[in-house]
Amino acid sequence: MGIIQNLRDSMSDNSSSTFTVQGILVECSHCGHTQFKKREGQLNTAGLTFLNLDWADRSAVVLVCTNCGKLEWFLID
Ligand SMILES: [Zn+2]
């Protein structure tokens, strides 16, 4: 069972959308905006290996707030 059970997004990766994680609408922790763009990647890239985290080989979904640009990270098992 993954952390993200109900992640959904629009048809295009370039368009913003709302997302739900475990049934809860994702809101920006900074500005409260609910429109995000989704990016996916490995946590062991992009200079994050210095964190030396044991879950660093998991995939991550990054939601970028389209209002203020804050990044919200979610791990996928
Ligand atoms: Zn924001």
Image (cartoon, grey):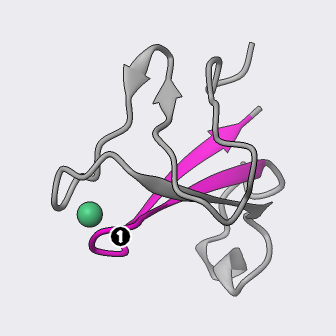
Q: Main secondary structure of the magenta part?
A: strand
Relative image position of residue 39 (x, y in whole percent): 68, 62
Where on the image, by quarter, is ligand 1? bottom left
Please name whichever residue, 61 or 69, is drawn nearer the observer in this view of the structure: 69
Which element carries disc 1, helix, strand or loop?
loop
Q: Quick check: 50 above or below 3?
A: below
Q: Quick check: 64 above or below 28?
A: below
> Is 23 positioned to the left or the right of 5 in the image?
left
Mark 1, residue position: 70
- What is the quadrant of residue 56 in the picture? bottom right
- What is the quadrant of residue 15 in the picture? bottom right
Classed neighbour count for the residue bearing mark 1: other residues with Cα under 10 Å, few (<14), some (14–19), many (≥20): some
Q: Residue at x 79, y 77 (%)?
A: 45
Which residue reaches farthest bottom?
Answer: 47
- Does the beta carbon at disc 1 come under 8 Å from ligand 1? yes
Instruction: Give the position of the N terminus as an image quadrant.
Output: top right
> Is 44 positioned to the left or the right of 21 in the image?
right
Q: Quick check: 16 above or below 70?
A: above
Relative image position of residue 28 (x, y in whole percent): 28, 52
Is 40 contained in the magenta span? no
Q: Residue at x 72, y 37 (%)?
A: 76
Range shown magenta: 59-76
Q: Residue at x 52, y 56 (%)?
A: 16
Which amino acid, mark 1? Lys
Relative image position of residue 67 (x, y in whole percent): 29, 69
